[in-house]
Amino acid sequence: MTKAALADTPLNAKDEASVPAASDRRHALAAMFRVVRGETERRAAPLTPEDQVVQSMPDASPAKWHRAHTTWFFEQFVLTPHLKDYRVFHPDYAYLFNSYYVSAGPRHARAARGLLTRPGAAEVTAYRHHVDAAVERLLATADEALLERLAPLMQVGFNHEQQHQELMLTDILHAFGQNPIPPAYDPAWAPPRAIAGAGFATLAEGIHTVGHAGASFHYDNETPAHRALVGPVRIARALVTNAEWLDFMADGGYATPTLWLMDGFARANDEGWEAPGHWRKVDGEWRIMTLGGLQPVDPAAPVCHVSYYEADAFARWRGAHLPTEMEWEVAARAGLIDDAFGIVWQWTRSAYAPYPGYRAAPGALGEYNGKFMVNQYVLRGASLATPEGHSRTTYRNFFYPHHRWQFSGLRLASYDN
């Protein structure tokens, strides 16, 4: 949740507004649909049917559920309202595979998704084929007016599925990490190479436009673009590394209450944190569970699988802080930071809240982002699991401060001269 490339449209596609004819729009939408749907299946291919049903914690979902949910999304929001005489694949699947769209009807409990041994992985594959064929038929037969209405819905569907492609990897990695004989998702997997950055870049005080502007695809939480006072601040060019984190651990970082927010220190003690998520000691040496299996911790690699609480404590230990999301965005636009995309999502100190003037979209799709704007923190950038074409400088990812099963890391900022 592959590497992310800096792009303002999914799959580096053209804006819908720039497509000159219905035939071109039809071709572009169909091509993107096949690529996105194919990437989901490519990520599922290394998994056995048993792998696909496991749910290792309430925050994670089985791979089979991700495959079915993204299919239900197209069935619910694209096919049922727009394809005449479309028949749903199974009347119970809307209940089983709706996630949190209350307006779309009742749903199976999130924490119990791993209990859905039926339908099996093969039935979910058949479901995907059924919906894929119907979407292809819809795109092939839609007139220009319908294509214009479908284009934004399809774009949301593409990006929604790409989000779940990332979750497929983070969730199966967590599940594999619970196995006493740790399996590898991909034995040939290797982590992306970090850029060796040094020091801090200075961001002078100024008023900048932040947030998404323009017609290219974006989520509603990235808007409206607005002016904000940013700086002066110094922001680290490079991500925090495992070597730096090992120093933090050796200095008693996890046991020093003055470094921690109260809730974070309680969480760390209750759950026995003494290292980042997916780290374990083997014969006296730290190793990390990766998509390639259990591997030695590479001191030069950026630290990964840390919560907001840990990131905040580390920053305080270093006499620094986490950047705000505005500082991060302005610095990224200016090319002042390295490894902004494609390695780890980076925690910011910004609470996930609406931008000035924000309005959620009408209808069930309005539940996509706005109703989660409380008690979470913003992460910026993109990770090694983010599908290509799914990142941009204005993208606002968000998680609860204790979450650390994602590919999440940090860079530092300082107000010192």
Image (spheres, rainbow, N blue to C red):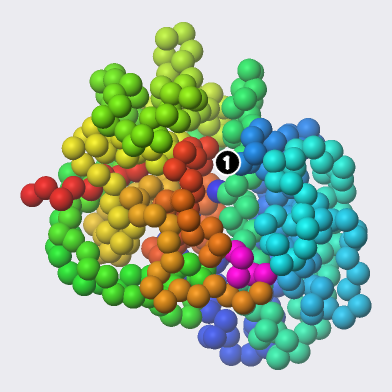
Estimate the x, y position of residue 218 in percent, counting from the top left. Answer: 50, 70
In this view, 41 is above or below 389: above
Q: Which residue is mark 1?
A: 170
For disc 1, the neighbor class at 10 Å (few under 14, some 14 to 19, many from 20) is many
Residue lying at 42% horizontally and 9% vertically, measured from the top left: 284
In this view, 209 is above or below 395: below
Residue lying at 76% horizontally and 89% vertically, measured from the top left: 143
Residue lying at 58% horizontally and 75% vertically, measured from the top left: 361
Estimate the x, y position of residue 81 in percent, counting from the top left. Answer: 79, 77
Residue at the left extreme, as displayed: 417
Instruction: Report if residue 366 lies within the magenta region.
Output: yes
Amino acid of disc 1: Thr
Locate residue 212: give its quadrant: bottom left
Q: Is residue 168 visible?
A: yes
Q: Describe residue 353's horizontal placement relative to residue 81 as left or right.
A: left
Estimate the x, y position of residue 288 in percent, counting from the top left. Answer: 48, 26
Residue lying at 57% horizontally and 81% vertically, measured from the top left: 16
Q: Main secondary structure of the magenta part?
A: helix
Camera-side residue of 295 and 63: 63
In this view, 239 is above or below 270: below
Residue at the top extreme, as displayed: 283
Instruction: Report if residue 233 lies within the magenta region.
Output: no
- Range of the magenta residues? 364-368
Q: Describe residue 53's horizontal placement relative to residue 10 as left or right.
A: right
Camera-side residue of 235 and 36: 235
* SS under mark 1: helix
Estimate the x, y position of residue 221 in percent, counting from the top left. Answer: 48, 67
